[in-house]
Image: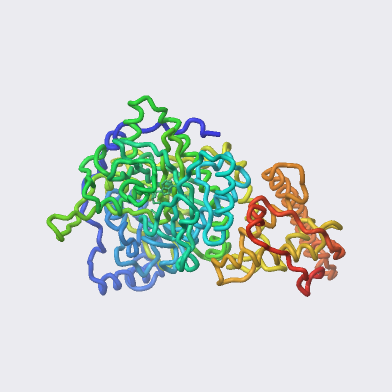
Amino acid sequence: MEPAGAPPPSCAPAREAEEPPGSPALPAERPRDGEPARKAREEAAAVERSRGRGPAGRAARSAGRRGPEERGARAGRRPRVTVDSSKAKTSLEALKISLRQLRWREFPFGRRLPCDIYWHGVSFHDNYIFSGQVNKFPGMTEMVRKVMLSRAVRTMQDLFPVEYNFYPRSWILPEEFPLFVAEVRMMKESDPSWKPTFIVKPDGGCQGDGIYLIKDPSDVRLAGSLQSRPAVVQEYICKPLLVDKLKFDIRLYVLLKSLEPLEIYIAKDGLSRFCTEPYQEPTLKNLHQVFMHLTNYSLNIHSGNFIHSDNVNTGSKRTFSSILCRLSSRGADVKKVWSDIISLVIKTIIALTPELKVYYQSDIPAGKPGPTCFQILGFDILLMKNLKPMLLEVNANPSMRIEHEQELSPGVFENVPSPVDEEVKVAVIRDTLRLVDPHKKKRKDTQSQTSEHVSETREDLLDAGPAGGPEYETSKNPEAALPSLCLKQVFPKYAKQFNYLRLVDRVAALFIRFLGVKGTTKLGPTGFRTFIRNCKLSNSNFSMASVDILYIDITRRWNSMGFDHKESGMCLQAFVEAFFCLAQKKYKSLPLHEQVASLIDFCEYHLAALDEKRLLCGRGVVERRGAAVTCPTDGLEVTPALHAPLLNRTAAAGKLADCRSHRYPAAVSPGAGRD
Ligand code: ADP
């Protein structure tokens, strides 16, 4: 289903669609002194002030115990958002421009006191942060690697093959090499006219690194490196849409503003990156011509044909809106293109969120101090000749550079500004910041509830602890001078149309519930048994011994694929496979997604009943504590350990079964049947 009322494509060049940033260019915000010692003194004084010590503190106390925020607010000034940019890396320039436009305070060398926002160039784990917001989610880098993304999308393809047909058919190497060979052979036999091409992409690679095209599975370079570097082999999209006879792809910026509740925004404009050799459908002769087949900027920039654009409509890198404009002038239904792209983005994020939630609870366990997260993702999308968008990959760290290297004379390079990059990327960063502005909500509250203002700011001040007083903006609201947001909300806006796809999210919630120890990402055998018993999934046909066999079998196989050896136990994807097995066994005749949905309903029902019972018991215990009456913990029934026939495999596992002479272990663990 397509999102109704998708935002109309911005056909006007982005420059017209949104005014150029109107705020007068302010000098770069640096720490006011630029001198570490003085800065440290100032910050120490701020700590003293906030604690009410020292001369400043005494003055504050004598001023009627009014905190700096309260005083600032009374003077009609707004607090300035503080941003730690010390780890921004290559996104620093675009971030600086954004912060200037917003008139927020940048801390380019970090800050001893907490900042409101931490801007990281690479990953969540750059720093130890206990409050505020950080622009990366834990686990995102891992999740969008080619193998993990392919696995996550494949799980969704097993459930919803039609909805997830925007991702090329893929196999994971080396483990699925036999399956790849077998499936290609089968497809060729059933359709002799099928002359496919495949693209092999090393896991974790970027910028076209190590990518090559093949015509036959036997051409996969299996020797040596694959064991140490897994890869994805994918059907090559042979008929891409061409502009000026060139293949191009689209880099679209997507803001994942929150995981729970899910909030997704898409930038109205993106970048189109062009090949530099006219496209021809792949043949044995042209397979190796990277400037014809790979759209990576980092590769094509080395072609003599690369054209640096000084406007957004021409050259080897253009705005996506300029392409849409051109398509529209040729009569294409660009509104449909946009709506398909929005669907693709929402569905892809729905495929990623279950695992992300597992990482999130592991890194930032509920109830412990930690930051909230948001993240800008780069979606690489290829438009097929028929205008259907296909997902190529998702980047956790899309390049935010706004300059490029130019060879002035042979061997002499210089960084020169890239207007196309600046136009798109600065808007994305600035508007991301506007959307996560920690003071915005407070400002709204302040405007609407003046009477509550004093108590609220007092609370904030207490919460702020040693952070001292906030920075103040003395001039008018800089938002007024900014163009309208370039990021459009698509979720929860279109939630109704996509919520039915969020089955694995619900399975992940069950998984997380039974993880047990905080900070883990894998489920132990006891956790799995507890899940089975609490959800009342064990019965005379499915004994606890079979439960153990299922656990051992699936966990062993997933662990042998060998991605995460740090922890032992069952990872989410293995749990999902086990869950699908159980669903197939319980609801035999339904399609897989209905089997899974029914089993989720069944589990959620029993867990809700259990929670209610525990709540009542808890109350009972409290009420009757004096009489030392205890309640049975959960009234579990332990099913006698009868041996059950082996379970059916899931569709995904079943596909692999032919290629792996996998056998269930004959014996179960010593603890089988007891717990
Ligand atoms: P990298 O992370 O190394 O850039 P990508 O998956 O983005 O890897 O692939 C690099 C380029 O190869 C893409 O930009 C695109 O031009 C081309 N490409 C990738 N996958 C396909 C595919 N399935 N069909 C056609 N072209 C593809």
Quadrant containing the C terminus in the rendered view: bottom right
Instruction: Please tell me in which quadrant of the rendered image residue 532 appears.
Output: bottom right
Q: Is residue 340 left or right of residue 422?
A: right
**Direction top: furthest residue:** 331
Q: Is residue 68 visible?
A: no
Which residue is at 44% across, 69% downward?
128
Residue 170: % across, % down: 52, 51
Residue 160: % across, % down: 61, 43
Quadrant containing the N terminus in the rendered view: top right
Which residue is at 38% across, 39% downward?
268
- Foreground residue among 564 and 601: 564
Instruction: Please tell me in which quadrant of the rendered image residue 486 appears.
Output: top left
Residue 413: % across, % down: 17, 58
Total labels drawn: 0
**Direction left: furthest residue:** 409
Residue 64: % across, % down: 39, 61
- Foreground residue among 411 and 515: 411
Q: Is residue 613 left or right of residue 468?
A: right
Q: Is residue 310 left or right of residue 130?
A: left
Q: Is residue 135 visible?
A: yes
Instruction: Please tell me in which quadrant of the rendered image residue 164 appears.
Output: top right
Q: Establish if 13 lies above or below 103.
A: above
Q: By what rule are the colours in the image chosen?
A: rainbow
- Foreground residue among 72 and 528: 528
